Image (spheres, rainbow, N blue to C red):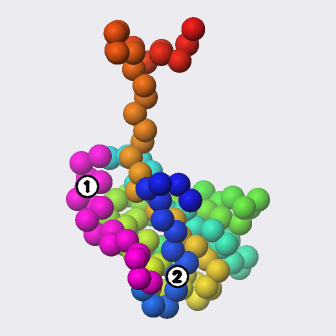
Amino acid sequence: MFPGQFSVNGGMDKRPGTLDLSKQVSEANGQLNPKRFSIFVKNVPHDKFKIESVCDFFKQFGEVINVNLDSRKNACTIKFKEIVSAVKAAEFAQTNYIWDDMNVKVIYNTMAPPKLPTSPLTGNLNVLQK
């Protein structure tokens, strides 16, 4: 896990210490990082590992505009049209099983992209070059 990320496993009871993502929506609207529109789903059941199945389940949270399946990792990335949809899907996973499977994990990236270093003298981004 990286700072700014959290993972939820879809437990039946909301675990103590889980993040409330509703405030993330207002903050995210000011910083439209493309990763904020997406969630990453691990341990997708084999019978649900189809674009149609993934879309059918996650469209309840909002319009799905892209699904990338990774068969090597048995995972997928789901991109929504709106940030609030990704947040709703991640919040749902905090208190519910995804596809009635307790092994499915949902990750929502709340971290802003890192700022590139600049030279204090010139302001250029090529500080790391010789």
Looking at the picture, does residue 58 appear above or below residue 118? below
The answer to whether any part of residue 65 appears in the image is: no
Q: Residue at x 30, y 61 (%)?
A: 24
Amino acid type at mark 2: Gly
Q: Quadrant of residue 15?
A: bottom left
Amino acid type at mark 1: Glu
Q: Which numbered disc, 2 or 1, marks the residue that appears first in the sequence? A: 2
Residue 49 percent across, percent down from the top left: 68, 71
Residue 125 percent across, percent down from the top left: 43, 18
Looking at the picture, does residue 46 appear above or below residue 124? below
User: Which of 83 and 10 lies nearest the eye of the viewer?
Assistant: 10
Q: Residue at x 61, y 85 (%)?
A: 102
The answer to whether any part of residue 47 appears in the image is: yes
Classed neighbour count for the residue bearing mark 1: other residues with Cα under 10 Å, few (<14), some (14–19), many (≥20): few
* Residue that extends furthest to the right in the rendered view of this protein: 72
Classed neighbour count for the residue bearing mark 2: other residues with Cα under 10 Å, few (<14), some (14–19), many (≥20): many
Where does the C terminus fall, quadrant-wise? top right
Labels 2 and 1 touching (C-beta < 8 A): no
Where does the N terminus fall, quadrant-wise? bottom right
Residue 122 percent across, percent down from the top left: 35, 9
Residue 38 percent across, percent down from the top left: 46, 58
User: Which of 90 and 3 lies nearest the eye of the viewer?
Assistant: 3
Distance from label 2 to label 1 (Cα)?
24 Å
Q: Residue at x 38, y 46 (%)?
A: 112
Tell me the number on the disc at residue 10.
Answer: 2
Q: Indicate whether residue 17 is drawn in magenta.
A: yes
Q: Which residues are magenta?
A: 15-31
Residue hosting label 1: 27
Tell me the number on the disc at residue 73.
Answer: none
Q: Quadrant of residue 45?
A: bottom right
